[in-house]
Amino acid sequence: MNTLVVVAHPSLDETSIANRIIVDRIRSLSQVTIKNLHQEYPSFTFKVDTEQDALRKADSVVFQFPFYWYSVPGILKEWMDQVLTYGFAYGSTGDKLKGKHFLVSTTVGGPVDAYCESGYNNYTIGDLLKPLRQMSNLTGMVYHRPIVSHGMIFIPNVYNTREEVEGRAREHAEKLHRYITAEKTEAMPSNQLLDF
Ligand SMILES: Cc1cc2nc3c(=O)[nH]c(=O)nc-3n(C[C@H](O)[C@H](O)[C@H](O)COP(=O)(O)O)c2cc1C
């Protein structure tokens, strides 16, 4: 199964701890194509035909990103805006993503208990990921249960230790590795999204 991993991190090779560990773990898998958006498109202007061809060839699409301001990093939103066009991703003839598997894989700075109605972030990660889930629905993709890891921010003497973040990133990487190499058959039951 061809898997396209769309990576959005402004500094994957320099400042990233978590996403670098995760991407490095799956880099050498056969049939995996890693697309590092910031590296390929520092100006945020995408070659739409190239991107759509990459999507056409994929059976499975993964979005790998750090959670930024309760959403995807800006470059990933811009990629969606430019690449997922009418007639390609939606509309009466826009069926090119239909049936492909789709996974959100994201690292979240805040702790898990902050992401609920009584926590300081008020909403669950499932709530906040709903726009991506609906993009998947509209384009006819098969939405899989997201892989989400919390406590992924490292600020010395403030948030976590480097070792804690690296350990969680390795666990996340194993989950993603298992997902990519597993048989994929069915969509995630709709009631599982609110569990995070
Ligand atoms: C611009 C920016 C926005 C962020 N917004 C959030 C946020 O909304 N919620 C959260 O829990 N963490 C947030 N974080 C923390 C990141 O999610 C965390 O640092 C990242 O997942 C760590 O991955 P990395 O080591 O690959 O950079 C933010 C970080 C940055 C730099």
Image (cartoon, helix red, strand yellow):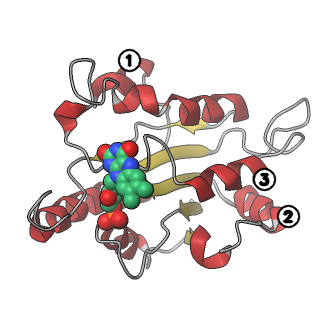
**Left or right for 123, reference 158:** right
Q: How many residues crowd around disc 1 within 10 Å: few (fewer than 14), some, or many (20 or more)? A: few
Q: Position of residue 19 (x, y in %)?
A: 36, 66
Real-space CA distance between mark 2 and mark 3, rounded to the nearest whole angstrom: 10 Å
Q: Nearer the viewer, mark 2 or mark 1?
A: 2
Q: Amino acid at mark 1?
A: Asn
Pointer 3: what residue? 82
Image height check: is 20 above or below 172?
below
For the residues labelled 1 and 3, say whether their Cβ atoms are less than 8 Å apart. Answer: no
Q: Which mark is residue 191?
A: 1
Give the quarter of the figure containing the C terminus.
top left
* Of the image marks 2 and 3, the number of the one nearer the N terminus: 2
* Of the image marks 2 and 1, the number of the one nearer the N terminus: 2
Image height check: is 160 above or below 151?
below
Q: Which mark is residue 49?
A: 2
Q: Position of residue 9 (x, y in %)?
A: 48, 66
Query: Under tag 1, what secondary structure?
Result: helix
**Residue at the spot 49% in from the left edge and 46% down from the top edge:** 103
In this orientation, which residue lies closer to the viewer: 65 or 5?
65
**Residue at the spot 78% in from the left edge and 58% down from the top edge:** 52
Image height check: is 135 above or below 84?
above
